[in-house]
Image (cartoon, rainbow, N blue to C red):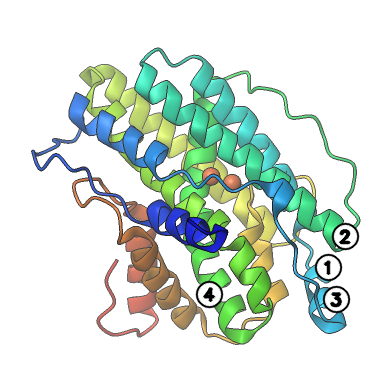
Amino acid sequence: MTEALLVEHADFAMRNWVDPDPSPAPIGSARHMGMFCRMLLETHNPYRPAVINWPKLEPDARARVTSLPIWDMAVQTEGRASARVAAFAARERIPALRAALEMDGSEEARHKAVLSRLVEAYGIALEKEPPYPAPKDIEWGWLVTGYSECIDSFFAFGLFEIARRSGYFPPELVETFEPVIQEEARHILFFVNWAAWYRRNLPLFKRLKFYLRVAAVFCFLIWERIGIARGLDSKGVDDANFTLSGSSAIGADLKPRDMLVLCLEENRRRMAGYDLRLLRPTLIPRLAALASRLMGAQGVRA
Ligand SMILES: [Fe+2]
Ligand SMILES: [Fe+2]
């Protein structure tokens, strides 16, 4: 196979996965767990950041890319995510789940490597990175990373499409970055299935405790994002992915309603190729669909 064909094959394989066994996979069952782990492992795209050919950009495109105020936050978010996922993987005893979590963590580390190489290739100056210690509360770190990805990736799907359509990012750069965005789609698909499987297997009392914990995670993430949106603390906030601050930087000329509709379309498109027996992220898409309807959008669904 030529290199171009190999790349095309890997790209298709990362976006499309169906378990060949047609039997049902009830949520919470061992079969469900095996399925969402294999989905992540078998859709891994083996690209290597070191060999990415960063396209040479025209001066105006380069100026747009380098002036985005997101690079420090993006690199640090990936650094923290990889440390948290790796810590959670290390304490997992089920081999298949551990292997999938390790893969998830290594992909986060690779995102950081991709971003670091991009920053280097275009001469973007970064501030000194902080250390990324394993979290003291390992489950909290995993939940914060998982749910923050559910929020941020949903908006990143739409923003990335806007940047592609408007030409804000030149096509070569969009193509280079595309696998990273699809990887986040796989991560949130894996995470929501893990969360449903985990919850289902907890005894009632622990399940209630888990619901409270998830509610606390969401309060924390909302508080953090309000801080970012107000521009109070764009440097020091821990988990706010770059998507929130990225929207204004891209200068998208879209009404909020149309932006939400585009995020919903892109979310559906990115999730469409995976086995329908797996759960899809629903909370953020449902809230976005509701908000867009309240803003007057017709016929929108999550
Ligand atoms: Fe990532
Ligand atoms: Fe991720």
Q: Amino acid at mark 4?
A: Glu
Q: What residue is shown with label 3?
A: 63
Q: Amino acid at mark 2?
A: Ile
Q: Position of residue 27 (x, y in %)?
A: 18, 35
Residue at point 64%, 29% (across, down) = 83
Spatial separation of the CA atoms under disc 4 and disc 2: 23 Å
Kindly indicate whether the residue at mark 4 contacts the one at mark 1 (C-beta within 8 angstroms).
Answer: no
Kindly indicate whether the residue at mark 1 contacts the one at mark 3 (C-beta within 8 angstroms).
Answer: yes
Kindly indicate whether the residue at mark 1 contacts the one at mark 2 (C-beta within 8 angstroms).
Answer: yes
**Other-residue count near label 1 (Cα within 10 Å), few / some / many at <14 / 14–19 / ≥20:** some
Spatial separation of the CA atoms under disc 3 and disc 1: 5 Å
- Quadrant assignment, res 209: top left
Residue 66: image tag: 1
Q: Is residue 1 left or right of residue 134?
A: left
Q: Position of residue 254 (x, y in %)?
A: 55, 85
Residue at point 42%, 52% (across, down) = 14
Spatial separation of the CA atoms under disc 1 and disc 4: 19 Å
Q: What residue is shown with label 2?
A: 124
Q: What residue is shown with label 4?
A: 161
